[in-house]
Amino acid sequence: MTGRRAAAILAGAIALTAVVSARQVFRTSTDLVLLNVTVADAAGHLVSGLNKEDFEIFEDGVLQVVSNFSREPLPIALSIALDTSTSMERKLPVAQEAAIGFVRRLGPRDVAQIIDFDSQAQILQAFTNDQAALEQAIRKTQAGGSTSLYNALYTAISELKSVKGATPTEVRRQAVVALSDGEDTSSLVTFEDVLDLAKRSEVAVYTIGLRNKEELAINGKWNEADYILKTLAQDTGGRPFFVADVSQLPAIYGQIADELGNQYSVGYISKNTKHDGAWRKINVRITRPNVVARTKSGYFAPRDKR
Protein backbone atom coordinates (compact mmCIF):
# COMPACT_ATOMS: atom_id res chain seq x y z
CA MET A 1 0.00 0.00 0.00
CA THR A 2 1.44 3.38 -0.98
CA GLY A 3 1.85 6.12 1.59
CA ARG A 4 -0.60 8.34 -0.30
CA ARG A 5 -3.28 5.63 -0.35
CA ALA A 6 -2.78 4.86 3.33
CA ALA A 7 -3.13 8.52 4.17
CA ALA A 8 -6.34 8.75 2.14
CA ILE A 9 -7.82 5.70 3.90
CA LEU A 10 -6.86 7.12 7.28
CA ALA A 11 -8.42 10.48 6.42
CA GLY A 12 -11.60 8.76 5.29
CA ALA A 13 -11.75 6.72 8.47
CA ILE A 14 -11.31 9.83 10.59
CA ALA A 15 -14.05 11.64 8.66
CA LEU A 16 -16.41 8.67 9.03
CA THR A 17 -15.66 8.46 12.74
CA ALA A 18 -16.43 12.17 13.09
CA VAL A 19 -19.79 11.77 11.36
CA VAL A 20 -20.73 8.74 13.44
CA SER A 21 -19.62 10.47 16.62
CA ALA A 22 -21.69 13.56 15.78
CA ARG A 23 -24.78 11.42 15.29
CA GLN A 24 -24.13 9.41 18.44
CA VAL A 25 -23.53 12.39 20.72
CA PHE A 26 -27.13 12.62 21.84
CA ARG A 27 -28.24 9.60 23.82
CA THR A 28 -31.09 9.34 26.25
CA SER A 29 -30.06 9.44 29.90
CA THR A 30 -31.89 10.25 33.11
CA ASP A 31 -29.47 13.04 34.01
CA LEU A 32 -28.71 14.38 30.53
CA VAL A 33 -30.51 17.65 29.81
CA LEU A 34 -30.99 18.22 26.08
CA LEU A 35 -31.77 21.66 24.70
CA ASN A 36 -32.75 22.82 21.23
CA VAL A 37 -31.44 26.37 21.06
CA THR A 38 -32.35 29.08 18.57
CA VAL A 39 -29.85 31.93 18.29
CA ALA A 40 -30.62 35.28 16.68
CA ASP A 41 -28.99 38.69 16.42
CA ALA A 42 -30.52 42.03 17.40
CA ALA A 43 -32.33 42.25 14.06
CA GLY A 44 -33.89 38.81 14.53
CA HIS A 45 -31.71 37.06 11.95
CA LEU A 46 -30.70 33.50 12.76
CA VAL A 47 -27.04 33.10 13.73
CA SER A 48 -25.10 30.09 12.45
CA GLY A 49 -21.53 28.90 12.85
CA LEU A 50 -21.32 29.10 16.64
CA ASN A 51 -19.09 26.74 18.60
CA LYS A 52 -19.63 24.93 21.88
CA GLU A 53 -17.47 27.52 23.62
CA ASP A 54 -19.92 30.25 22.61
CA PHE A 55 -22.66 28.76 24.83
CA GLU A 56 -23.10 29.25 28.57
CA ILE A 57 -25.88 27.31 30.27
CA PHE A 58 -27.14 28.21 33.74
CA GLU A 59 -29.45 25.99 35.76
CA ASP A 60 -30.98 27.79 38.72
CA GLY A 61 -28.16 30.31 38.35
CA VAL A 62 -25.38 27.70 38.40
CA LEU A 63 -23.09 27.51 35.37
CA GLN A 64 -23.13 24.05 33.79
CA VAL A 65 -20.56 22.22 31.65
CA VAL A 66 -21.68 21.76 28.04
CA SER A 67 -20.99 18.11 27.26
CA ASN A 68 -22.94 17.62 24.04
CA PHE A 69 -23.04 19.94 21.07
CA SER A 70 -24.08 19.82 17.43
CA ARG A 71 -24.70 22.47 14.79
CA GLU A 72 -26.61 19.93 12.71
CA PRO A 73 -30.24 19.86 13.87
CA LEU A 74 -31.46 16.48 15.02
CA PRO A 75 -34.36 14.93 13.07
CA ILE A 76 -37.72 16.25 14.18
CA ALA A 77 -41.19 14.94 14.94
CA LEU A 78 -43.90 17.55 14.32
CA SER A 79 -47.54 17.83 15.28
CA ILE A 80 -49.27 20.26 12.96
CA ALA A 81 -52.58 21.43 14.42
CA LEU A 82 -55.07 23.39 12.31
CA ASP A 83 -58.11 25.29 13.57
CA THR A 84 -61.10 24.25 11.42
CA SER A 85 -63.87 25.97 13.42
CA THR A 86 -66.66 27.80 11.61
CA SER A 87 -64.83 31.13 11.80
CA MET A 88 -62.05 29.65 9.65
CA GLU A 89 -64.29 28.93 6.65
CA ARG A 90 -63.07 31.75 4.41
CA LYS A 91 -59.49 31.56 5.67
CA LEU A 92 -59.06 27.80 5.44
CA PRO A 93 -57.97 27.50 1.78
CA VAL A 94 -55.03 29.86 2.34
CA ALA A 95 -54.22 28.21 5.68
CA GLN A 96 -54.19 24.80 3.99
CA GLU A 97 -51.76 25.91 1.29
CA ALA A 98 -49.49 27.52 3.89
CA ALA A 99 -49.42 24.33 5.97
CA ILE A 100 -48.74 22.25 2.85
CA GLY A 101 -45.80 24.50 1.99
CA PHE A 102 -44.50 23.92 5.51
CA VAL A 103 -44.81 20.12 5.16
CA ARG A 104 -42.88 20.20 1.89
CA ARG A 105 -39.87 21.58 3.75
CA LEU A 106 -39.56 18.57 6.02
CA GLY A 107 -36.34 16.60 5.70
CA PRO A 108 -36.13 12.90 4.78
CA ARG A 109 -35.51 11.92 8.41
CA ASP A 110 -38.38 14.05 9.78
CA VAL A 111 -41.92 12.87 10.54
CA ALA A 112 -45.16 14.76 11.09
CA GLN A 113 -48.79 14.24 12.00
CA ILE A 114 -51.85 16.35 11.13
CA ILE A 115 -54.49 17.29 13.72
CA ASP A 116 -57.57 19.34 12.92
CA PHE A 117 -59.73 20.78 15.65
CA ASP A 118 -63.16 22.35 15.82
CA SER A 119 -65.60 21.07 18.43
CA GLN A 120 -63.30 18.05 18.74
CA ALA A 121 -59.64 17.33 18.02
CA GLN A 122 -59.05 14.65 15.41
CA ILE A 123 -55.85 13.07 14.11
CA LEU A 124 -56.23 13.06 10.33
CA GLN A 125 -52.80 11.58 9.64
CA ALA A 126 -50.55 9.69 12.04
CA PHE A 127 -46.81 10.35 12.12
CA THR A 128 -45.20 9.72 8.75
CA ASN A 129 -42.50 11.09 6.45
CA ASP A 130 -44.81 10.62 3.46
CA GLN A 131 -45.36 14.21 2.36
CA ALA A 132 -48.12 13.24 -0.08
CA ALA A 133 -50.10 11.62 2.75
CA LEU A 134 -49.62 14.69 4.94
CA GLU A 135 -50.72 17.00 2.13
CA GLN A 136 -53.80 14.88 1.48
CA ALA A 137 -54.76 15.05 5.16
CA ILE A 138 -54.44 18.85 5.18
CA ARG A 139 -56.64 19.16 2.10
CA LYS A 140 -59.33 17.03 3.78
CA THR A 141 -59.93 19.61 6.51
CA GLN A 142 -63.31 21.36 6.48
CA ALA A 143 -64.59 24.26 8.56
CA GLY A 144 -67.39 23.88 11.08
CA GLY A 145 -68.07 23.82 14.81
CA SER A 146 -66.47 25.53 17.80
CA THR A 147 -62.83 25.74 18.95
CA SER A 148 -61.22 23.03 21.11
CA LEU A 149 -57.67 24.41 21.01
CA TYR A 150 -56.61 22.95 24.37
CA ASN A 151 -57.82 19.49 23.43
CA ALA A 152 -55.79 19.70 20.21
CA LEU A 153 -52.63 20.85 21.97
CA TYR A 154 -52.98 18.19 24.67
CA THR A 155 -53.44 15.52 22.01
CA ALA A 156 -50.51 16.78 19.95
CA ILE A 157 -48.09 16.82 22.88
CA SER A 158 -49.28 13.43 24.17
CA GLU A 159 -48.89 11.81 20.75
CA LEU A 160 -45.32 13.07 20.45
CA LYS A 161 -44.34 10.98 23.47
CA SER A 162 -44.89 7.83 21.43
CA VAL A 163 -42.62 8.84 18.55
CA LYS A 164 -39.36 6.92 18.38
CA GLY A 165 -36.13 7.63 16.57
CA ALA A 166 -34.94 5.71 13.54
CA THR A 167 -32.75 3.66 15.88
CA PRO A 168 -33.29 2.69 19.54
CA THR A 169 -30.78 5.32 20.68
CA GLU A 170 -31.58 8.17 18.31
CA VAL A 171 -33.07 11.31 19.82
CA ARG A 172 -35.66 13.35 17.93
CA ARG A 173 -36.54 16.96 18.48
CA GLN A 174 -40.26 17.43 19.10
CA ALA A 175 -42.41 20.41 18.17
CA VAL A 176 -46.02 21.45 17.80
CA VAL A 177 -47.11 24.10 15.30
CA ALA A 178 -50.65 25.22 16.11
CA LEU A 179 -52.79 27.68 14.15
CA SER A 180 -55.94 29.17 15.69
CA ASP A 181 -58.12 32.20 14.95
CA GLY A 182 -59.95 32.40 18.25
CA GLU A 183 -60.18 31.60 21.94
CA ASP A 184 -60.90 28.10 23.16
CA THR A 185 -64.62 27.53 23.59
CA SER A 186 -65.18 23.77 23.91
CA SER A 187 -62.19 21.86 25.32
CA LEU A 188 -62.50 19.30 28.08
CA VAL A 189 -58.99 20.03 29.36
CA THR A 190 -57.81 23.39 30.69
CA PHE A 191 -54.93 25.60 29.67
CA GLU A 192 -53.22 24.72 32.95
CA ASP A 193 -53.43 21.02 31.99
CA VAL A 194 -51.81 21.76 28.63
CA LEU A 195 -49.07 23.95 30.07
CA ASP A 196 -48.15 21.41 32.73
CA LEU A 197 -47.98 18.61 30.16
CA ALA A 198 -45.87 20.76 27.85
CA LYS A 199 -43.39 21.68 30.60
CA ARG A 200 -43.01 18.00 31.51
CA SER A 201 -42.28 17.09 27.90
CA GLU A 202 -39.47 17.89 25.46
CA VAL A 203 -41.85 19.65 23.06
CA ALA A 204 -41.37 23.16 21.68
CA VAL A 205 -44.72 24.77 20.85
CA TYR A 206 -45.05 27.32 18.05
CA THR A 207 -48.35 29.17 18.09
CA ILE A 208 -49.94 31.23 15.32
CA GLY A 209 -52.78 33.53 16.33
CA LEU A 210 -54.77 34.55 13.27
CA ARG A 211 -57.08 37.50 13.78
CA ASN A 212 -58.63 40.28 11.71
CA LYS A 213 -58.41 44.05 12.01
CA GLU A 214 -61.96 44.37 13.34
CA GLU A 215 -61.15 42.06 16.26
CA LEU A 216 -57.95 43.95 16.94
CA ALA A 217 -59.96 47.17 17.20
CA ILE A 218 -62.08 45.75 20.05
CA ASN A 219 -60.22 46.63 23.24
CA GLY A 220 -59.32 43.55 25.28
CA LYS A 221 -60.77 41.07 22.82
CA TRP A 222 -57.53 39.13 22.48
CA ASN A 223 -55.91 39.66 25.86
CA GLU A 224 -56.60 36.15 27.15
CA ALA A 225 -55.76 34.44 23.88
CA ASP A 226 -52.54 36.45 23.55
CA TYR A 227 -51.44 35.45 27.03
CA ILE A 228 -52.17 31.78 26.44
CA LEU A 229 -50.42 31.52 23.09
CA LYS A 230 -47.42 33.55 24.25
CA THR A 231 -46.98 31.70 27.52
CA LEU A 232 -47.16 28.25 25.97
CA ALA A 233 -44.66 29.14 23.26
CA GLN A 234 -42.19 31.00 25.45
CA ASP A 235 -42.12 28.42 28.25
CA THR A 236 -41.36 25.59 25.82
CA GLY A 237 -38.72 27.34 23.71
CA GLY A 238 -41.02 27.88 20.74
CA ARG A 239 -42.25 31.20 19.43
CA PRO A 240 -45.65 32.94 19.22
CA PHE A 241 -46.81 34.68 16.06
CA PHE A 242 -49.81 36.98 15.61
CA VAL A 243 -51.01 38.02 12.18
CA ALA A 244 -53.96 40.16 11.04
CA ASP A 245 -54.10 38.86 7.47
CA VAL A 246 -54.38 35.23 6.39
CA SER A 247 -52.10 36.02 3.43
CA GLN A 248 -49.22 36.32 5.93
CA LEU A 249 -49.43 32.66 6.89
CA PRO A 250 -47.01 31.29 4.24
CA ALA A 251 -44.32 33.67 5.49
CA ILE A 252 -44.97 32.69 9.12
CA TYR A 253 -44.75 28.98 8.39
CA GLY A 254 -41.58 29.75 6.43
CA GLN A 255 -40.04 31.48 9.46
CA ILE A 256 -40.85 28.48 11.65
CA ALA A 257 -39.33 26.10 9.09
CA ASP A 258 -36.18 28.24 8.90
CA GLU A 259 -35.87 28.24 12.68
CA LEU A 260 -36.37 24.50 13.05
CA GLY A 261 -33.76 23.97 10.34
CA ASN A 262 -31.15 26.14 12.07
CA GLN A 263 -31.20 25.12 15.72
CA TYR A 264 -28.27 24.04 17.87
CA SER A 265 -28.51 20.85 19.88
CA VAL A 266 -26.84 21.33 23.26
CA GLY A 267 -26.69 19.03 26.26
CA TYR A 268 -25.27 18.91 29.76
CA ILE A 269 -25.27 16.72 32.86
CA SER A 270 -26.82 18.75 35.66
CA LYS A 271 -24.57 19.54 38.61
CA ASN A 272 -27.65 19.15 40.79
CA THR A 273 -27.69 15.41 41.53
CA LYS A 274 -30.96 15.44 43.46
CA HIS A 275 -33.76 13.39 41.92
CA ASP A 276 -36.52 15.33 43.64
CA GLY A 277 -38.83 16.14 40.72
CA ALA A 278 -38.40 19.88 41.34
CA TRP A 279 -38.63 22.56 38.65
CA ARG A 280 -35.24 23.82 37.48
CA LYS A 281 -34.92 27.11 35.61
CA ILE A 282 -32.67 27.25 32.54
CA ASN A 283 -30.96 30.27 31.02
CA VAL A 284 -28.73 30.05 27.95
CA ARG A 285 -26.35 32.88 27.12
CA ILE A 286 -24.14 33.42 24.09
CA THR A 287 -20.70 34.88 24.78
CA ARG A 288 -20.72 36.92 21.56
CA PRO A 289 -22.17 40.46 21.70
CA ASN A 290 -25.64 41.39 20.43
CA VAL A 291 -26.75 37.77 20.15
CA VAL A 292 -29.64 36.18 22.04
CA ALA A 293 -30.44 32.49 22.62
CA ARG A 294 -33.91 31.03 23.06
CA THR A 295 -34.79 27.64 24.53
CA LYS A 296 -37.27 26.18 27.00
CA SER A 297 -37.57 27.98 30.31
CA GLY A 298 -36.73 24.94 32.42
CA TYR A 299 -37.52 21.32 33.21
CA PHE A 300 -38.66 19.06 35.99
CA ALA A 301 -35.83 17.07 37.56
CA PRO A 302 -36.07 13.28 37.44
CA ARG A 303 -37.57 11.59 40.45
CA ASP A 304 -36.28 8.35 41.93
CA LYS A 305 -38.77 5.50 41.97
CA ARG A 306 -39.71 4.35 45.42
Image: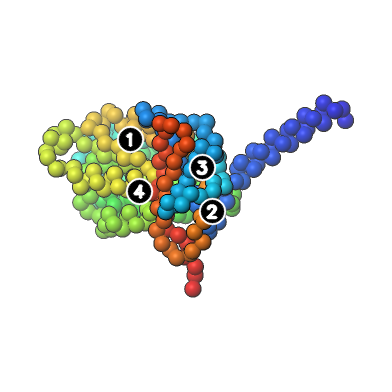
Residue 115: image location, x then y, percent:
35, 46
Q: CA distance from mark 4 to mark 3?
A: 18 Å
Residue lying at 13% horizontally and 35% vertically, measured from the top left = 217
Mark closer to the observer (2, 3): 2
Q: Which residue is mark 2?
A: 269
Q: Amino acid at mark 2?
A: Ile
Q: CA distance from mark 2 to mark 4?
A: 21 Å
Find residue 235 and name its label. 4
Tell me which numbered mark, 3 or 1, is placed earlier along the sequence.
Answer: 1
Find residue 96 and name its label. 1
Q: CA distance from mark 4 to mark 1?
A: 27 Å
What is the quadrant of residue 79 in the picture?
Answer: top left
Residue 70: image location, x then y, percent:
55, 40
Q: Which residue is mark 3?
A: 265
Q: Amino acid at mark 3?
A: Ser
Q: Are marks 4 and 1 in contact (CB under 8 Å)?
A: no
Q: CA distance from mark 3 to mark 1?
A: 30 Å
